[in-house]
Image (cartoon, helix red, strand yellow):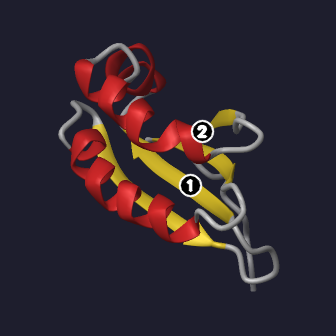
């Protein structure tokens, strides 16, 4: 499993519209092959900042998979206008096994 991470900075005064667009966009990503789950968490300290976490079977399922699809074109049209600046997306591997008491 691969974890996609992005910090989304939503333009001031557009939070409600962003959250409505996100609800509309969610089924687009959920319909993608290799999609395993999504979380979007608003920051407690910083208004308009969201943590996006998407679980994929592989990086390729995200890109070129979802990003090369017609669903991504609609996702982009719905959500990208809200970001300032545009987020950096990173992919993370399985967690490191830690021995805790």
Q: Residue at x 63, y 60 (%)?
A: 51
Q: Which mark is residue 93?
A: 2
List the single residue furthest toward the front.
Answer: 13
Q: Which of the two labelled residues, at mark 2 and mark 1, occupies the earlier sequence position?
A: 1
Report the residue at 66% width, 56% height from top.
Answer: 10
Image position of 51 (left or right of 33):
right
Is mark 2 in CB contact (under 8 Å) with mark 1? no
Q: Residue 94: image x %, image y %?
A: 56, 45
Q: Position of residue 8 (x, y in %)?
A: 66, 51
Graded by Cα atoms within 10 Å as few (under 14), some (14 to 19) or many (20 or more), the crowding at tag 1 reads some
Q: Nearer the viewer, residue 50 or 17?
A: 17
User: Which quarter of the figure has residue 88?
Assistant: top right
Label 2 residue SS = loop
Residue 77 x, y percent position in the rendering: 41, 32
Task: State the image coordinates of residue 14 (x, y, percent, origin top left).
Answer: 59, 62
- The residue that appears at 49% across and 59% down in the rendered structure is 18
Of tags 2 and 1, which is closer to the observer? 1
Instruction: Give how far apart the Cα atoms at labels 2 and 1 are.
Output: 16 Å
User: Label for residue 83?
Assistant: none
Quick one: 53 or 67, which is closer to the camera? 67
Q: Which residue is mark 1?
A: 52
User: Quarter of the image holding residue 91?
Assistant: top right
| For residue 54, above or below residue 80 | below
């Amino acid at each position: 499993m691969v974890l996609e991470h992005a910090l989304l900075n939503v333009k001031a005064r557009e939070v409600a519209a962003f959250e409505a667009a996100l609800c509309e966009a969610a089924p687009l990503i959920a319909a993608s092959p290799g999609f395993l789950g999504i979380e979007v968490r608003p920051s407690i300290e910083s208004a308009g900042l969201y943590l996006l976490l998407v679980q994929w079977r592989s990086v390729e399922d995200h890109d070129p998979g979802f990003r090369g699809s017609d669903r991504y074109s609609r996702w982009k049209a719905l959500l990208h206008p809200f970001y300032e600046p545009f987020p950096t997306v990173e992919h993370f591997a399985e967690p490191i096994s830690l021995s805790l008491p």
